[in-house]
Amino acid sequence: MTVADIDRWNAGAVREVFQAATARGQATLDASRQLSSLAVFDTWEGATAEARKHANANIRLDLDAHGNEALAVARAADQAADGIEHVQSELRALRRDAGELHMAIDAMTNRVVPTSDCLATEALIGEMQLQPKLDAILAEANAVDEELATAINMADGDTAIPRSSGPAVGPAGLTPTQRESDANQERVREERAKLNAHIKDLQAQADRAREQGDQRWLGDLNNQLNAARYRVGEFDAIDDALGRAPETYLTQLEIPTDPSQKVRAAVAVGNPDTATDISVTAPGLGSSTKDSLPSMVTEASNLRDTAQKQLDRLGIPGSVVTIAWMGYDSPANPINTGSPRDLWRTIGDDRAQGGAATLAPYLQQLHVNNPNAHLSLFGHSYGSLTASLALQQLNAQGLHPVNDAVFYGSPGLELESPSQLGLGNGHAFVMRAPPGDDWIPEAASLAPLHGWGLDPYGGMMPELSSQAGVSQDGVVREGVHSHADYPRAVSGPGGDQLRMSGYNLSVVAAGIADLPDGGKQLVMAPTPLIPYPHPGR
């Protein structure tokens, strides 16, 4: 990829692909909807009628698949066009900067070169300042080129539609979450390109330091390289997470300027702007974007599938979206690190308070984008404290975006009464493994000793079962045997299956924990419910 290639790019032409693919996708989906509304065969009876209905169903499946593929191509083209415009804008800015320093950009060699009126000293300074910026632009351009090639290959059938593309554009255009996700993914791509160029520069400096025998300089450079490579690993994890389910969105992204600080992100499985039911999961000790986000999205996808099955089983219309929220720096697990400092952090609430300050507005924004959706919040381990504090912060502001909450494997919630959460009576639950299988909730009885309120398992909230048994949908499910088991599926002959804990989470996520007709779908543990005052919702 050369600067000359970038100059020849035409974002407008790529936009035309976006428009054409969008029109084709919408027309195909409209045809499918019209076919479903035909009543001409409703009065037919017998084998002919059944055959015609079956044929119609197959045609609709084909139309829906083709329509969604066209929309996926449209979104890929739209993202590539955005990338082209950004790269060309960066290149124009660099050319302006070069002109002010009496430098120019050679479009064929990809080098910053001096103009005829540039002094030798100015040329050296100009190259040192501008060449790394040009290298970063070229790295980003190569990434855009790959995106553009993917869009073209998807359009002509040479490349299969990625599972993570999903339905791209609705009848009213992109929703707020889709626009935010596109912008966040674009930023990951830009930052990755800049980082790869920075790593290349650091590696060259490290090689020189090694040749000169400057160990002090070499040590500092190696530290910078390690931090930069870890950051690349975080970007890789985000890409991996986005590919773990058929339709995913990068709904939150925070990239600290200091590469030694961790990237924070959230991934939604499905579009929360259009769903009837949304759940958000906050993870616990030792979780991070790099090491945890992909597996969290897999768990979110399994949870969504099971929750959707419960709605379908009961004949309740609706759609479920599940969100893996890695939006805070959780404390390291002291069992894994053996560090007294990490142990101290687990009995402090600084990280939870910081996470709650980010989680609370995120929950409120979900509610603003989709005010009629049922919203659930799940907190695991130290994440349960984070979730509890977020709800308390919202309640103190008179905001109540969340309908239900489940805290599982919890060490404490800093609660004296569930009314502090701002939820309706009986809409906040706890869950724990059987005695001996998870020591963290067993330590919750110590919560009052370090200022984390009453023991959440002391009867202040209804307790959901995590033990093996038959769930209300007639499925035999395994129980929880470790602190990490709660959201994990169990592989079997019929495919991955959630444990009893996951089933209960799916019922809450689907908004059917307490149906109006009195039907009870949850499997409860033998913990009494103590009524408490609440603001109602």
Image (cartoon, rainbow, N blue to C red):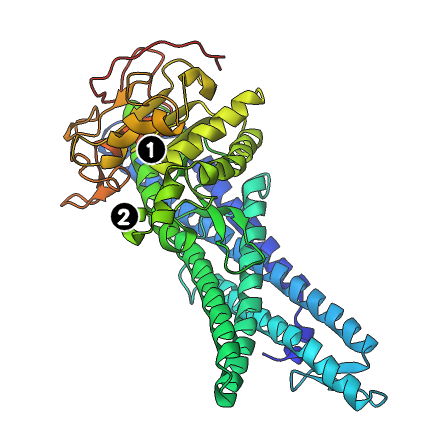
Q: What element carries label 1?
A: helix
Pick the front one: 125 or 251: 125
Pick the front one: 462 or 182: 462
> Which three-letter amino acid code belongs to the residue tagged 1?
Gln
Which residue position holds label 1? 308
Q: Is mark 2 on a helix, strand or loop?
A: helix
Q: In the rendering, at what x and y percent does residue 170 appear?
A: 54, 41
> Which three-letter amino acid code belongs to the residue tagged 2?
Ile
Compared with 263, 428 (above or below) is above
Compared with 360, 494 (above or below) is below
Compared with 159, 163 (above or below) is above
Q: Residue 335 carries which label?
A: 2
Q: Which of marks 1 and 2 is nearer the N terminus?
A: 1
Residue at 24 percent of width and 40 percent of height = 485
45 to the left or right of 233: left
Q: In the rendering, at what x and y percent does residue 385 appear?
A: 40, 32
Residue 416 placement: quadrant? top left
Q: In the rendering, at what x and y percent does residue 347 appear?
A: 37, 37
Q: In the rendering, at what x and y percent does residue 79 appear?
A: 57, 57
Residue 451 placement: quadrant? top left
Say if residue 60 shows up in the picture: no
Residue 2 placement: quadrant? bottom right
